Image: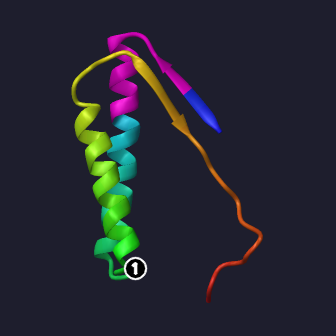
Amino acid sequence: MASFDIDSKTDSYAARRILERVYDTIREESSSGRDDSTGTSELLESFKTLRDAAKRPTAGKLTITYEQYDDGFEN
């Protein structure tokens, strides 16, 4: 887990760039035809909401959690 305290406009800009990059990555992956699931659409919409909210510089905290599962990848 990584947490970023946003207490300046520079921090806010950095958080916005992180969210923009994640949104773009999810959008690219979903448009490549790899995954057309409803879950991907919901995830993309969630990150779009976060990305749009980050356009307004405000103080706060951005927390990113990476969960690793024991299951392997599907081939």
Name the residue rendered at 28%, 74% in the picture: 31
Residue type beneath disc 1 = Asp
Look at 37% across and 41% down and name the residue there: 19
- Vertical position of residue 41 compared to residue 55: above or below: below
Residue displayed at 35% across by 35% down: 17
Magenta highlight range? 4-16
The residue beneath circle 1 is 35
Residue 17 vs 46, above or below: the answer is: above
Q: Is 49 located above or below residue 28 in the figure? A: above
Q: Please tell me whether residue 8 belongs to the stretch shown in magenta.
A: yes
Q: Is residue 35 found inside the magenta-colored segment of the image? A: no
Residue 56, image quadrant: top left
Point out residue 26 in the picture as x, y percentages from the top left corner: 37, 61
Report the residue at 53% width, 25% height from top.
4
| Residue at the extreme right of the image, as rendered | 70
Could you say where residue 75 lies in the image, as x and y percent from the top left?
Answer: 62, 89
> Which residue is at the far bottom?
75
Instruction: Specify the farthest residue to the top.
Output: 8
